[in-house]
Amino acid sequence: MFSTICSGALWGVRAYLVAVEVDIARGLPSFSMVGSLSCEARESRERVSVALKNAGFDLPPNRVTVNLSPGDRRKEGTAFDLAIGVGMLASLSYFSPDAVKDTLFLGELGLNGEVKRARGVLPIVREAARKGIRQCIVPQENAAEGAVIPGIMVRGASHICQVLNFLRAKESEREEILPLCRQDLESLLDREDGRGAPDFDEVNGQESARRAAEIAAAGFHNLLMAGPPGAGKSMIAKRIPGILPRLTAEECLETTSVASVAGLTGEGAALVTKRPFQSPHPAVSLAAMVGGGTVPKPGVISLAHRGVLFLDELPEFRREVLDSLRQPLEEHRVTVSRTGGSITYPSDFMLVCAMNPCPCGYFPDRNRCRCTETQVRKYLSRVSGPILDRIDLCVELQPVDITGLGGKRGEESAAIRKRVLLARERQIRRFAGTACRFNADIAAADIDRYCALGGKEKACMERLYRSLHLSARAYHRLLKVARTIADLAGEDRIGEEHLMEAAFYRPVQEYWS
């Protein structure tokens, strides 16, 4: 007998529906699977057969053929097990074919029939809802994750016997067997208020760095902090997520989709509601940074999507790893090409970097620094000009004097966040109806529209352009930073003081002159 069960698969962070076709016919006992399958997907035949046997089902010695359609797209992962098992039971007439109509099945089967968690449940459920599927049966551990998608019923199962009882039960009895999982997206978002992150009041001194962090958070600008060891660079970076605006509903779905595809959503977690913060080690490989691998997964820069990517000890990262950030910083996505096709991952993040000015860390203080000029230049040259050109704000930190330690605490993150949110509200009104979210998103073609300058401001900008030897990209970035500074000041137009402050945060000429 033949049956067709609906399931889903991933291609990058996108999902598509898969028709699991099962045919059980007389003949020599065999179990064949086709449909462009990876090794772990092909191993489903052993998992499903043993799981059904151990769950108490009597499988006749027939010829079993399973096809995962479309056959021209490679299928990865183990989440087809449940759909294959349900398809075999349907072909053996354990329940009516109408019981699986408009229902998607997803999950890995243990050898005892247990339904185990799967990767990518949220994007698959989202695609199912878009295609008009009525309900999804997913692992119990992933039910909350899928339930945040409106317009579709999501039920969590922990054993294949539960699924069979559900499919054989009357409509009135089904709710008791596999109850609906319900999640309210807005209530989940309301729980995120910025608490839980380290507070800025623990940072002593470093007023210019704190101000740069506030500007970066308000406009989602890239930030570089340079200074000696122990000046507070890492402390400030780790506190930036606590002053960022909270994620919107669509951004939450995007970040949760990436985490789900990577298999990093917590057990029973419904949604990622906090801005991601990724801090890779300087020894990170190129594949780990941008994504890919034999079984393609998102890299660090995609896991930081809509959040912060913090690179501590920036010059210690390999040159090819740093240069791989060029495309994501400009296009907010990264494309990984393989023989089977190209996968595009989202990578719209705020880049925050920290570095020492020389190998020993104390240049230009010649009382402490013993590095030669050649060593300093070689160390700084590890950060290429194109990467520096994509940095919006650069600030130099000095060691904190003992008089600044243990005294009055600094301004709290809550107060800084209020100013950031006010600036964010101005940007929401400014960019209403457009693809822009923050000032950092302004395209070069829209600079004159959103960053208009008066006569005095144009003359000031011309002087800055020539004296700082700006590139066209740096010119546009300086204007966008000035736009954010004006928003923080509550000004509708960019003034000379805003331009001068933005110019102050260009890369430190003492280092890269």
Image (spheres, helix red, strand yellow):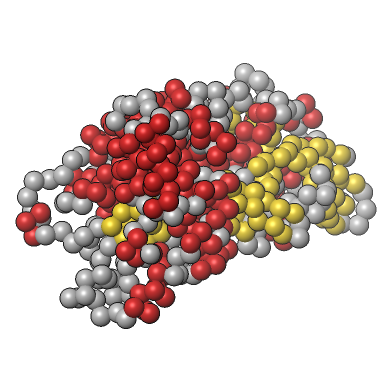
Q: Looking at the rendering, in which quadrant would you find the N terminus? A: top right
Q: Residue furthest right?
A: 27
Residue 77 versus residue 66: which sits nearer the camera? Answer: 77
Q: Quadrant of the C terminus?
A: bottom left
Instruction: From the top left corner, tell me how far across and down residue 198 is, in percent.
Output: 26, 47
308 to the left or right of 346: left
Asked if residue 229 is positioned above or below residue 417 in the image, the reply reads below
The number of numbered discs placed on residues in the rendered structure image is: 0
Residue plotted at (34% across, 65% down): 511
**227 or 447: nearer the eye?**
447
From this viewpoint, is residue 421 visible? Answer: no
When the figure is inspected, residue 321 is found, relative to residue 16, above or below; the finding is: below
Residue 454 point in image, percent of width and height: 40, 30
Q: Is residue 92 left or right of residue 248?
A: right
Q: Quadrant of residue 446?
A: top right
Query: Which residue is drawn at the image coordinates 78% and 49% (left, top)?
Result: 73
Q: Residue at point 87% right, 56% down?
A: 29
Q: Nearer the viewer, residue 127 or 255?
A: 255
Above-or-below relation of 281 to 482: below
Point out residue 173 in the picture as x, y percentages from the top left corner.
61, 22
The one nearer the camera, 447 or 243, is 447
